[in-house]
Amino acid sequence: MVRVSRVVVVVPARDEEADLATCLRALCIAAEAVDVPTRIVVVDDGSRDDTRRVAASLLDPPHLVVEGPGLGVGAARRRGVAVACGDHPDRSGTWVASTDADTVVRADWLVRQVTHARSGVDAVAGLVRLRAGGPPGLGRAFATHYGQFAPGHPHPHLHAANLGIRFATLHAAGSWPLHDRGEEHALWARLPEDARVLADPELVVETSPRLVGRAPRGFARDLAGLARQLDTPGD
């Protein structure tokens, strides 16, 4: 068994006051289910709304709300990792989980990741599901486009909103790339050749069906493309 001594969860957020509370409440439940200390770090990356106040009202120490560099989501994730792990005396046993401020994780989200980490997995990629409330037909179109995957079988998807990685592996890859889109793909391409990577179809988060997101070329843009195919207004 590979030792895991603590978990860090990094959540970049910009103008996310509407969804952040739901995200953080779910994360706190997931953190309480893990048998090692867990720290949630919200990186407020240039918000113009009450994102920081919402985060601060829900997170007590050891959880943190920090200022981001304002350079995009990749840089925000990197900032969160640096703050959470930079001065910790035991970084070798740290597992870093990544999600987004408009997601809702399951109660076992971190437990599954820690179980994988203890089995020797260095990085794990999960799936996303759409929450209810999007344009009519979007959920069905997304499910068809995305695909269905049986438990125990790998999947082809990679989302920064549902990802976990051993700190040593992240450090060897140079931390999160400074990208405003596709930062997870750039990170995966830089993983050490001997890194053990797993695509777990039972590691699931629910994400917002919004068609206008905070990253200009992110997941919401892809959903808007599906919505246009349905002749659904993309606003």
Image (spheres, grey):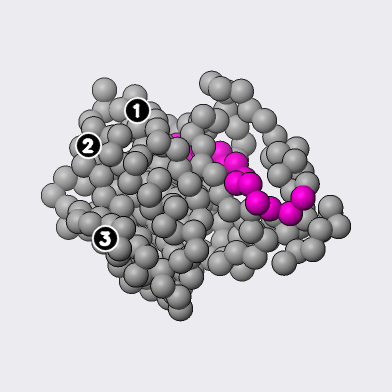
Q: According to the image, label 2 marks what residue?
A: 36
Q: How many marks?
A: 3
Amino acid type, mark 1: Thr
Q: Is residue 134 magenta?
A: yes
Across and down, in percent, residue 205 comes to 51, 42
Q: Is residue 115 magenta?
A: no
In front of the other: 196 or 57: 57
Q: Residue at x 81, y 58 (%)?
A: 232
Across and down, in percent, residue 28 comes to 33, 46
Quarter of the C terminus within the rendering: bottom right
Q: According to the image, label 3 marks what residue?
A: 64
Q: Residue at x 16, y 45 (%)?
A: 90
Q: According to the image, label 1 marks what residue?
A: 115
User: Which of the two discs, 2 and 3, labels the residue nearer the N terminus?
Assistant: 2
Amino acid type, mark 2: Val
Q: Magenta stretch: give its range.
A: 122-136
